[in-house]
């Protein structure tokens, strides 16, 4: 699976949009981009994933560049409860192969939302 | 809807004692199941995964073993715990293909 690069930390004011970037320049054609977050002492929470089209759900939006070498997770109206470590992960399919969809977590971005 | 349960939430064990952590999934059939460990201040490391009953694959050599006696039950075990086994243990499930993995609340294991 391709590696990802994220900033170590970011700050965001409550109520503003939080834009978290991720570089994945070695992504291959069949790999998806996944975003998770982990609040202290809890298991990672799935946020969103996508292949090449922009995606939106009730939690966030995912913008993937046309060349697929980078993406941005957007939390449209950040709250204090969004303070967490955000992980961007590139992964192939669960089906077949030797990794069976293993998620490789890097260090992620520590997002701090302040009042 | 699907849910995943892990227990216990916290566990303190002496060195050399056995371990059994259990994970169960509800609301889905034949899921892929995973055990991860997160050491303090580090990222998650995949330990084991299973694509079916009795089918276990290990990602890294270690002092732990895993079993899947039922379709939606995944167990992490050790015969003799080491200090280095301390950490946050997480179970996850997914369906096949590109669907995401969903994690339980984890077990925080401390070895004394």
Image (tube, coloured by chain):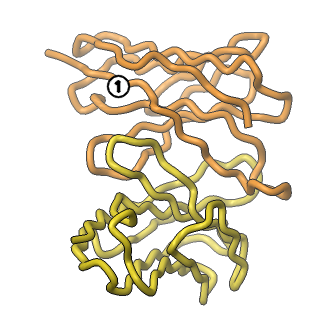
Chain colours: A orange, B yellow
Residue B1 can be seen in this image: no
- Quadrant of the image containing the C terminus of chain B: bottom left
The residue at 34%/14% (across/down) is A10
Question: Chain ID for label 1?
Answer: A
Quarter location, residue B95: bottom right
Q: Is residue A4 visible?
A: yes
Q: Quadrant of residue B13?
A: bottom left
Tell me the residue at 35%/25% (across/down). Answer: A110
Tell me the crowding category of disc 1: few under 14, some 14 to 19, or many 20 or more residues within 10 angstroms, Cα based: many
Residue A112 image offset from top left, x and y in percent: 26, 21
Q: Is residue A53 left or right of residue B7?
A: right
Q: Residue furthest left?
A: A115
Q: Position of residue A91 (x, y in %)?
A: 70, 39
Q: Quadrant of residue B81?
A: bottom left
The number of numbered badges drawn on the structure is 1
Residue wearing tag 1: A110
Does residue B7 appear left or right of residue A25 in this picture? left
On the rendered structure, is B40 left or right of A69?
Answer: left
Q: Nearer the viewer, residue B57 or A49?
A: B57
Q: Is A88 situated above or below B86?
A: above
What residue appears at the point 33 percent right and 75 percent down from the top-left corner?
B7
């Amino acid at each position: 699976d391709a590696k990802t690069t994220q900033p170590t930390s970011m700050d965001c004011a409550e109520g503003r949009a939080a834009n978290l970037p991720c570089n994945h320049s070695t992504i291959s054609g069949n790999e998806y981009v996944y975003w998770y977050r982990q609040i202290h002492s809890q298991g990672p929470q799935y946020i969103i994933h996508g292949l090449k089209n922009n995606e939106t759900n009730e939690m966030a939006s995912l913008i993937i560049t046309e060349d697929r070498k980078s993406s941005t997770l957007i939390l449209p109206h950040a709250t204090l409860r969004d303070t967490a470590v955000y992980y961007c992960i590139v992964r192939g399919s669960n089906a077949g192969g030797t990794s069976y969809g293993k998620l490789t977590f890097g260090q992620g971005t520590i997002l701090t939302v302040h009042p | 809807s699907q849910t995943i349960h892990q227990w216990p939430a916290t566990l303190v064990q002496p060195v050399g004692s056995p371990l059994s952590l259990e994970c169960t999934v509800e609301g889905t059939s034949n899921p892929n199941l995973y055990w991860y460990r997160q050491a303090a201040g580090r990222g998650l490391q995949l330990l084991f995964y299973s694509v079916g009953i009795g089918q276990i694959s290990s990602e890294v050599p270690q002092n732990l073993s895993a079993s899947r006696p039922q379709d939606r039950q995944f167990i992490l075990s050790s015969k003799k715990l080491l200090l280095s086994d301390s950490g946050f243990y997480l179970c996850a499930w997914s369906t096949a293909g590109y669907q995401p993995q969903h994690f339980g609340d984890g077990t925080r294991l401390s070895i004394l």
